Amino acid sequence: MPCKTITCITLGGALETIQDKIFVASKSEVRGFTKKGKMFLNFDTCSTDPIKFMHVSGSDLLIAGDHVLTHFHDCKDGSSYVCPDVITGIIALNSLKLMFLIPIVACQDKTLKVLRRSEVTQTIPLGGVPTCLHLFNNDGGVTGDLLLVGSMHGDVTLYQISHTDFSIKWTLSPGKSTSSITCLYCYDMSANDSLDLILGRDDGSIEIYALLTRDEDQMMPVLRFSYNCNESITSLQAGVVGSPGFDEVLVTTYSGWLFGLTTESIDKQSTELNANISPATDDKIRISKLKMEIDSLELAVAKERQQYEQLTQEDSAGLSTLPSLNINDKLIIDVEDKAYLLSMEVDVPIDNVLVQSDVNIELLDVDKNTAVLSLSECDPASGNAVLATYRCQANTTRLEFKFRSDEGTCGTLQAFITPHTQPKGCQLVKYELRPLCLHVRTHRVLDESKSYNVVNIRGDFSVYEIHSWVEKCLLNIPDKPPATDLVTYRFESVLLSTILQVQYRFHQCDVR
């Protein structure tokens, strides 16, 4: 690839044909490749933000960054939409069955926005922040307007969507695993001419559900199989890959692993391989060459590592630099436990994590956490309220823990992540704990029949100034205020279930 970093990849092709064209996004460029690796498209979208999301439907291309969705038709600019909140995903319903394109934008404010060109035709409220969008049965179902939506809190909902209306077919609750949905796919794993729903979560869980119908109505899916690899799932697909006649699920993880889950009996497979199958001559030559290449690479790595360790131990004029860790971290509120869930994952094994906070927090245990927790006494004069160390087990690349924080105080939580590498080093990650840290975005409105407190603020301040004040007090506020005359945000307390509404405009702010 001529590019350094790939931010998005998807399949596409002409309508009513096999979608076997590979589209790759890097920064503001989109490249297209055939299945044989020949590049047939090199398109610069001139986007100011890096492309984070991409969807291809025939000759229509949808790309999006944090706030802007752009629609291209035959590589010509068609329309664009500026989202007032952070975009978490994009997709388009089946244009072949619906006879027109319906783009859908998932936003951090727990909504889906249905578009017609640059206009929002309807806004669909959701129960959680959407993290994954996928067409039902991979093509939108019989009608082409069925959409699967996975959320940050682990539930999956099937919607039927048009330009002006929507309906909910079913909602699959997360059950024991409340980790967010990272990928969805539909495939017939049971060989009964009925597709199954395959989903992956960021805690490493892979689940297969049977999709049931009755009188052409969709029923609640039933769990058939589950597996956990203890690493965040980044993508999954299904098909016949390794053995003819046996379906498999291919999975990739955050640390770079690629593995498959097969319907074939492993004992039977190993017996047949030992008894009946012998590699061909060409395969033997390829295998021997691969083994020689791997051995030479291992020797080169060992030699360079030994030379590096000698240089770091000797008095040398050279400088030693530590590589930056690729940290996949997430801090969310667990509404049921009324606590924060902090997950951190790196692509190398973790030795230990030191947690420091300048405000009082209560550390809670997590069932999936195998690390050993050690608490240290803190001197109030040092500015430390909590000092804790999580010592991880061997080959641990992911750590989760929960904590509770009281509202009314603000501070900083710091995590020093030490990988199990040589030479020793650590990387710092900071998290701001806001004064109203137990309030989450909601679609509930104030009940005007009840009593409520009101705070009116007037003064010589701009919209950007009051927006920055609100952002420092509450969670999930976008970096910039929306381009509207009156800005409204609603929050719900996870402790008391009360509603907090913030409305502001130029020189005016009302809180109740």
Image: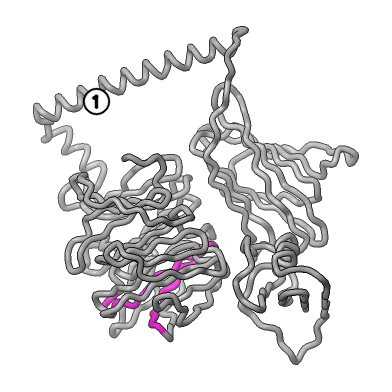
Task: Examine the rendering and report whether any part of residue 133 can be seen.
Answer: yes
Residue 289 image offset from top left, x and y in percent:
21, 23
Q: Is residue 294 above or below residue 212?
A: above
State which region is magenta: 141-163
Residue 509 image offset from top left, x and y in percent:
77, 75
**Is residue 366 toward the left or the right of residue 405 in the image?**
left
Residue at point 22%, 67% (across, down): 192
- Magenta span contains residue 148: yes
| Quadrant housing the N terminus | top left
- Magenta span contains residue 192: no
Secondary structure beneath label 1: helix
Residue 287: quarter of image: top left
Tell me the residue that label 1 is attached to: 290
Q: Is residue 419 above or below residue 479?
A: above
Residue 199 image offset from top left, x and y in percent:
40, 59
Residue 121: quarter of image: bottom left
**Is residue 77 toward the left or the right of residue 314 in the image?**
left
Residue at point 90%, 39% (across, down): 381
Within 10 Å of disc 1 (Cα), the crowding (few <14, some 14-19, many 20+) is few
Residue 294 image offset from top left, x and y in percent:
30, 23
Residue at point 17%, 27% (across, down): 286
